[in-house]
């Protein structure tokens, strides 16, 4: 287990108070630990376990984490396929919600609630790209969840951001995230609808200089990447202005970058593949095609 604590130690020292993945076993770089990840929402660490483990093994993990004085509280999340994640506080005080920081921006997170804490930590470089390229542009944030891309875009000088997500409670967290960064509410639109029923409204609010597409891989009844990603891509010519960029995200280990590049070639021949963003260094991947893929496409025609 020493390899886990070495990673935790290294990442804590680099976090400088920001959110961070302290251990990323799911990237298959640490044999025997593929079922373990540890996230950091200072001062709370969240252990997420993707299969059951022996009580002694867990006890040793928890005891080892207790040795890091920065870790003032520990949450344990047991995940099981097809079931709600179960979270428990192992030690320390964990508020129902807290403010986490990433690169100088604030986000509300709930380390002991839900399967995800409110901020996808692997998307740090995607948010940073948007922040660096949104100046003066209208931005469309599809599958916006808690609107972290929107916060990053406005921090980068975006003129206006349109966020679309059918989970209205998540858009409410998005509103709070904008408040936490003292952003101008008049520069943000929230559409709490199914994307596939909202194209008319989405189009009316465009065209856009940046469009972010960050759907789930598999959410039956709402979005299944294999068949539905194409339905989104098909709409891009009527949404993106010439010279604009699409940030297409895909997190399904079963299909790689080629899946999205081919869809774009077939449905959007006027868009050129510009490249793939590197994932943050706290998400090492044995096979990068299986991890998060964030790809850029520029509209040329
Ligand atoms: C992976 S999360 C998006 C993460 C987000 N982009 C971020 O940066 O934090 C996927 C989101 O897609 C939303 N969603 C799934 N299917 C949808 C649909 N058909 N219409 C609108 N939202 C949908 C879910 O509610 C969920 O919030």
Image (spheres, grey):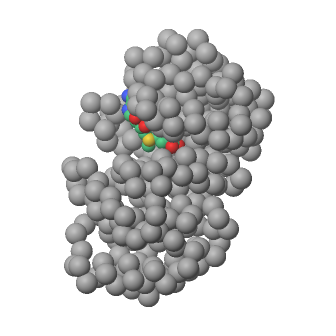
Q: Relative to residue 115, is residue 50 depicted above or below?
A: below
Q: Relative to residue 106, is residue 30 depicted above or below?
A: below
In the picture, the quarter occupied by the N terminus is: bottom left
**Displayed quadrant of residue 298:** top right
Residue lying farthest front?
A: 93
Q: Is residue 264 among the parts visible in the rendering?
A: no
Quadrant observed for ligand 1 in the rendered image:
top left
Left or right of 20 in this view: 226? left
Left or right of 183 in this view: 176? left
User: Which residue sits at x=50%, y=27%?
Assistant: 164
**Number of numbered callouts drawn:** 0
Left or right of 213 in this view: 78? left
Q: Please state the horizontal and vertical placement of residue 277, each as a whole percent of the image.
A: 60, 53
Q: Relative to residue 122, is residue 175 depicted above or below?
A: above
Q: Is residue 116 among the parts visible in the rendering?
A: yes
Which residue is more in the foreground, 175 or 233? 175
User: Which residue sits at x=22%, y=69%?
Assistant: 52
Which residue is more in the foreground, 17 or 151? 17
Q: Please state the horizontal and vertical placement of residue 30, each as a whole percent of the image.
A: 41, 78
User: Which residue sits at x=32%, y=30%?
Assistant: 222
**Displayed quadrant of residue 169:** top left
Q: Please state the horizontal and vertical placement of residue 201, each as a whole percent of the image.
A: 52, 13
Which residue is more in the foreground, 29 or 20? 20
Residue lying farthest bottom?
A: 2
Q: Please state the horizontal and vertical placement of residue 211, each as a whole percent of the image.
A: 59, 31
In the picture, the quarter occupied by the C terminus is: top right
């Amino acid at each position: 287990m020493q390899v886990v604590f070495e990673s935790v130690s290294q990442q804590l020292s680099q976090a400088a108070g920001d959110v961070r993945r302290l251990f990323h076993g799911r990237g298959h770089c640490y044999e025997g630990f593929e079922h373990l990840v540890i996230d950091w929402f200072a001062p709370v660490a969240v252990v997420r376990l993707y299969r059951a483990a022996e009580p002694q093994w867990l006890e040793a993990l928890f005891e080892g984490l207790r040795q890091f004085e920065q870790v003032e509280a520990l949450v344990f999340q047991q995940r099981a396929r097809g079931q709600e994640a179960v979270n428990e506080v192992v030690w320390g005080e964990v508020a129902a919600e807290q403010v986490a920081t990433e690169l100088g921006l604030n986000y509300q997170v709930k380390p002991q609630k839900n399967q995800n804490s409110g901020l996808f930590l692997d998307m740090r470089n995607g948010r940073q790209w948007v922040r660096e390229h949104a100046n003066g542009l209208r931005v469309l944030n599809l599958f916006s969840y808690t609107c972290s891309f929107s916060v990053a875009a406005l921090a980068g000088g975006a003129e206006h951001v349109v966020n679309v997500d059918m989970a209205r409670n998540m858009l409410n967290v998005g509103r709070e995230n904008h408040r936490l960064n003292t952003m101008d509410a008049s520069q943000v639109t929230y559409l709490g609808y199914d994307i596939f029923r909202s194209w008319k409204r989405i189009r009316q609010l465009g065209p856009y200089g940046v469009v972010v597409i960050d759907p789930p891989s598999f959410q039956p009844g709402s979005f299944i990447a294999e068949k539905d990603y194409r339905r989104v891509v098909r709409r891009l010519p009527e949404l993106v202005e010439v010279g604009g960029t699409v940030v297409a995200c895909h997190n399904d280990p079963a299909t790689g970058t080629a899946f999205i590049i081919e869809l774009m070639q077939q449905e959007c021949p006027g868009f050129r593949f510009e490249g793939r963003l590197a994932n943050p260094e706290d998400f090492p991947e044995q096979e990068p095609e299986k991890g998060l893929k964030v790809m850029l496409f520029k509209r040329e025609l």
